[in-house]
Image (spheres, coloured by chain):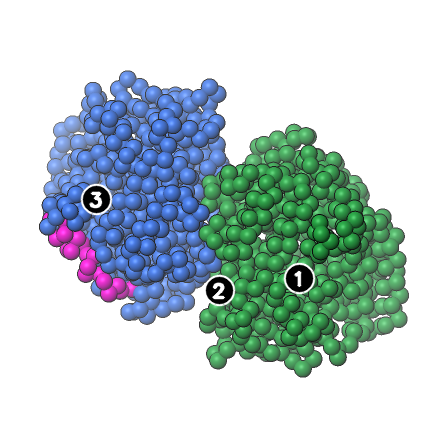
Chain colours: A green, B blue
Amino acid sequence: MDKILRIDMGAEGGPKATEEPLGDYAGLGGRALTSAIVSKEVPPLCHPLGADNKLVIAPGLLSGTTAAMSGRLSVGCKSPLTGTIKEANAGGQASQVLARLGYAAIVLEGKPKDDTPYKVMINKDGVQITPNNGLRMLGNYDLVEKMKGEHGDKIACISIGPAGEMKMSAASVACTDMELRPTRHAGRGGVGAVMGAKGVKVIVLDDTGMKMRSPKDPEKFRKANETWIEGLRKHPITSQGLPAYGTNILANIINEAGAYPTKNFMWGRFEGCSNISGETQAETETARGGVATHGCHRGCIIKCSGIYMDKDGHYLTKQVEYETVWAHGANCGIDDLDSIAMLDRLDDDYGLDTIEMGATIAVAMEAGVAKFGDGAAAINLVKEVGKGTPLGRILGNGAALTGKAFGVERVPVVKGQAMPAYDPRGIQGIGVTYATSTMGADHTSGYAVATNILNVGGSLDPLKPEGQVELSRNLQIATAAVDSTGMCIFIAFAALDQPETFQALIDMINAFYGLNMTADDVTDLGKSVLKNERDFNTRAGFTAMHDRLPEFFKKDLLPPHNITFHVKDEDLDTLFNW
Amino acid sequence: MDKILRIDMGAEGGPKATEEPLGDYAGLGGRALTSAIVSKEVPPLCHPLGADNKLVIAPGLLSGTTAAMSGRLSVGCKSPLTGTIKEANAGGQASQVLARLGYAAIVLEGKPKDDTPYKVMINKDGVQITPNNGLRMLGNYDLVEKMKGEHGDKIACISIGPAGEMKMSAASVACTDMELRPTRHAGRGGVGAVMGAKGVKVIVLDDTGMKMRSPKDPEKFRKANETWIEGLRKHPITSQGLPAYGTNILANIINEAGAYPTKNFMWGRFEGCSNISGETQAETETARGGVATHGCHRGCIIKCSGIYMDKDGHYLTKQVEYETVWAHGANCGIDDLDSIAMLDRLDDDYGLDTIEMGATIAVAMEAGVAKFGDGAAAINLVKEVGKGTPLGRILGNGAALTGKAFGVERVPVVKGQAMPAYDPRGIQGIGVTYATSTMGADHTSGYAVATNILNVGGSLDPLKPEGQVELSRNLQIATAAVDSTGMCIFIAFAALDQPETFQALIDMINAFYGLNMTADDVTDLGKSVLKNERDFNTRAGFTAMHDRLPEFFKKDLLPPHNITFHVKDEDLDTLFNW
């Protein structure tokens, strides 16, 4: 994992791949690497769909090793949704496989001559880039089936669906899971549209004949990994809550906390919550012969996912995640798990960010395009996106554009990106993250819900502004570092609460690379990632005025607590003072 | 004209009108007044369609007097198209009538309880505000007919069409002309959407029983007005070119200069130009029994307008202006005047900015929605907007949103507003204005075409960057002042070239108000207007990075001169240093 693969899609005579050493980027992985490359090489004022933007796909520092949970893949670029720098990451198999193939990053560059879809095949023998009009407008599911037919089932795929080909700002980049299904998505910010603009439909990875990456100090690494696994198996969230019920265990918790955004952020509690909770979901999965506890990649020991069957016991989609159940459920007033699962399946197939799509449909519902609670109508709306009708073009470009198209005032976005499943009035800490994140509204970039609601990493009153900026700052720094390791963000529950588990992560990196990093060095890494990202955004024209929630969060009271977001602007502006 | 009429559309118990003295705003009119009120009273981060935005409608300082050419009405707000402050102005009768009714401004405030359309009637007896569902979704033409039926033909109307009711970002505010036709539009920046968001469908003005405004020094005023008129009747552009052929006399000139944007800014010359030139247009008008020389308001002596009949000799629309002929013509590859006139008529009826709509249709054509050159298809696209179909929702929200919806990279906008009829590569000076204007891409805010092409106010090589920033700076300052007087911007041709004509304008203001303003004071007024506007924009999050043209103007060569826009960024950033 010491080289970068650059593919110039606009080269004379057709796409051209070249390899180069990491050079200045040595020592970086995942988000640290994608943000460093984008910040250094992409002109901040370029058109996100133009020749000058780059799509950077990077495994984390520990991806491709035996380290548990190290399967996240970072995808970075200038975002067509937000105009900011963007890193979205995904689970699945691709990160491990790409790392074992020796690549620290794939960089898609330039602008193709026409709209021919290309397949990029990477295996031990090298890189093949072939045009293939037969791939055009395939859904991710059919596309992966086709790739299996061509290359067998030892592959991993990184692909886009029709939404990415149509360069929609809600388009995701899909990664295949252990069952070779395209269920893991780098969802946010329209990274799929940038891949589409580069003309790359699918990257097929086959690491047959390649070895597991080997650490500099194998013994130290093995021991650290043991401590690491032990820590994850000890913490109640990573050892009980997430495996048993998946991420959607949060539905009842957040609903009870009064911060479960309902019907386009009108209320903080959803009357249909119990019908779509993690408990109901796991029960349904088991009853139908699905699986309630399942990992998204080899080496996962938390297993927060599962497999969701339809009423007839046929595979429909992976266990729908909390944010998706919320987005297509409570936020649209829909309390029917089967409708929600179908929406998840369609999003995965078309290649769409489920959070953005749920938020978008709720905005469209507020505009009167469909009725809140109407699952069948919501399914039809997502199908419009897949077909690329004018209505689909509106919805597929996200909540902000949809709000503008229909003249809706209540649009829950920051920097053009839709808020996820936590109302910032009911959980003030996550509001700070939404407002200030370099990515637009993003829960994963500083998951203050942990400390505001779950009492992880301490505890803080979710309804009070005190301490929220400091909390979000520390989480944003730590997350930027974790996003660079390839580690799933869910390790943070154990790492925040158990010092020895956090230390084990550092020990693994040190043992693998022969380093002597301290906790302070990890903090410095996180800060340097954020600095690169903020610097890009500043050069792209973003100011403190963009680090704000939409005004209705400051004006409209959220039931049941009847509270506004009341962290002061001047406090938000201190977030990056360290 | 010493009072402000505030109408709170969200007041308890229904809309409520109150009058107040000018107070802090004394001495201001037109754009100076709208920008002062918006800058002071509107929170820069508010939603443009929300309760906190205000729509300010203000006659100029000399409107309602006998001063020739003083019929411009300013409409200001936070723009839903650009997010910046906005002043769009229009000709027609409304400014004079409103001034004579004694109002320096109408301010529409608050947020209505529902979407009932209201009529505001203002006459010598006061203000009446009445809900009227019968007005819903009427085109401006039918609406004005209805008002004539209710109030006779001594009225002037300020209204919105369906586009404004649907809160589309390309929606205009229409003013009636001398024939009581809704042909004069405050077009730019979606001011009609803000009027729609306030729930006001039409403001009917009747100045029966009111007097012409009288100057402090009638004799001095009369003399200055004579010199003024003499100056306008002397300058070749205001006395010959504009009256004979209208503004579209520019078509051949700009085409010849190689700066006539063709097919979405692909080329600088249009092969069909002679079919749509001002000369052909005037000939067609005359041949069909229309009028080639006509004013838009009483007191106009330039008479740049006219009346355009269809093939059967029936009224179709007013003489289509240069920017509209270009937008719906060359920019869409359409060389058929009748199609263009029909598009103008539809825009006026639905209440749409013709520049934005032409630019938008060209972007849609680039996306493959219709073919360049297909006039019938373009007409159907504008009809989609009027119907509010999903495709219409896309197009009616302008070029930037349309480009995003369809994933188009070449979108000629600055701060989200479409560029008018001058390619900034072929006329570098206007590119400086597009980039730096407080309004987004706007030719009228600093019409460098005058000096780059028409040799008015000196001359400057249009293809060279030297001197363009200084030129644009001086023009932007002067224009901000002129936009505050109620004067039509076309007076600038004479005022720039003839010192005594410029002095006559100052003399008129001094005589009318009993002041002793100098030319420097006028400059200071312009600067103070720009300062208010820039200050608002800064607080709304705009930076130097937004004072940039889209990158394709810096990268793609424009035939026939094969030139890019090459004024340096650092020079653009000095524009407001004075």
Q: Chain of mark 2?
A: A
Horizontal placement of B276 versus A362: left or right?
A: left
Q: Amino acid at mark 2?
A: Gly
Neighbour tally class for label 3: few under 14, some 14-19, many 20 plus, Cα within 10 Å: some
- On the image, the x and y values in percent for residue A458 come to 80, 43
Does the magenta portion include B462?
A: no
The residue lying toward the viewer, choosing from B305 and A340, is A340
Q: CA distance from mark 3 to mark 2?
A: 42 Å
Task: Assess whether mark 2 and mark 3 are in contact (beta carbons under 8 angstroms).
Answer: no
Q: Chain of mark 1?
A: A
The residue that disc 3 covers is B316
* Dominant secondary-structure state across the stretch colored magenta: helix
SS assignment at label 1: loop
SS assignment at label 2: loop
Task: Classify A18 as above or below A405.
Answer: below
Which sits earlier in the primary sequence, circle 1 or circle 2?
A: 2
The residue that disc 1 covers is A182
The residue lying toward the viewer, choosing from A494 and A159, is A159
The residue lying toward the viewer, choosing from A198 and A391, is A391
Q: Are the numbered discs 1 and 2 placed on the same chain, yes or no?
A: yes
Q: Amino acid at mark 1?
A: Pro
Q: Residue furthest bottom?
A: A125
Q: Is residue A281 visible?
A: yes
User: What residue range appears in magenta?
Assistant: B268-286
Question: What is the number of the mark on residue A50?
Answer: 2
Task: Classify A131 as above or below B302.
Answer: below
Task: Assess whether mark 2 and mark 1 are in contact (beta carbons under 8 angstroms).
Answer: no
